[in-house]
């Protein structure tokens, strides 16, 4: 029995494979057993294929609420997260779900709940990150010079190789205090 992922694309591939097997002369029951589906499903798929060709085997769109953001808007929102939150008027660099919701509302006119946004962002591979803090006084050139010239002078030198000290004792003897 073959198990393909039960995604829309995987299901379409499964139906198409069933039609190829039937065209090769396999029986409906054998194809159903091979693919791990019912014989009745194979019959329905065969009818859809006869009526509509490969397009008849495509997955129908599911019911449900329409997405609030279209694909272009999704890409736009994700591009904002590559920039600093300060560019959008926030005091710190940290992006939070309420901040993202606020910017979406202001710039796109779409209201999204910040609690939903955490999951929405995670599904797109965005997880909350704390930006690394950097002191204002930090001078990278001075740090690099110190690491290059001072650190080698200060760090411990490897110990010189000397043979280890070996204490020989009589076998079976104990040390008592």
Image (cartoon, rainbow, N blue to C red):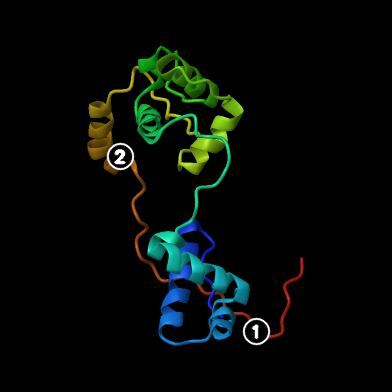
Q: Which residue has dot 2 on it? A: 151
Q: Position of residue 33 (x, y in %)?
A: 59, 82
Viewer-closest of 7 and 17: 17
Q: Where is residue 19 in the image (x, y as percent from the top left)?
A: 44, 75
Q: Is mark 1 on a helix, strand or loop?
A: loop
Viewer-closest of 156 and 43: 43
Q: Where is residue 146 in the image (x, y as percent from the top left)?
A: 27, 33
Viewer-closest of 104 and 93: 104
Q: Can you say which quadrant of the picture contains the C terminus?
A: bottom right
The residue lying at 52 percent from left, 65 percent from top is 5
Q: Which residue has dot 1 on it? A: 170
Residue 50 vs 104, above or below: the answer is below
The answer to whether 76 appears left or right of 169 in the picture is left
The residue lying at 58 percent from left, 83 percent from top is 29
Q: Is mark 2 on a helix, strand or loop?
A: helix
The answer to whether 175 appears left or right of 52 in the picture is right
Q: Can you say which quadrant of the picture contains the N terminus?
A: bottom right
């Amino acid at each position: 029995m073959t198990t393909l992922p039960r995604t829309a694309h995987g299901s379409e591939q499964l139906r198409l494979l069933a039609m190829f097997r039937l065209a090769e002369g396999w029986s409906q029951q054998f194809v159903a057993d091979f693919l791990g589906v019912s014989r009745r499903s194979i019959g329905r798929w065969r009818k859809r294929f006869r009526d509509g060709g490969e397009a008849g085997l495509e997955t129908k769109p599911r019911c449900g609420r329409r997405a609030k953001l279209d694909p272009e808007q999704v890409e736009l929102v994700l591009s904002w997260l590559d920039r600093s939150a300060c560019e959008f008027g926030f005091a710190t660099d940290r992006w939070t779900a309420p901040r993202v919701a606020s910017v979406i509302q202001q710039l796109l006119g779409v209201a999204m709940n910040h609690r939903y946004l955490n999951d929405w962002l995670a599904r797109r591979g965005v997880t909350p990150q704390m930006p690394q803090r950097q002191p204002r006084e930090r001078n990278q050139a001075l740090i690099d010079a110190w690491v290059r010239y001072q650190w080698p002078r200060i760090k411990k030198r490897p110990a010189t190789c000397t043979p280890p000290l070996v204490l020989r004792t009589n076998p079976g003897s104990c040390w008592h205090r």
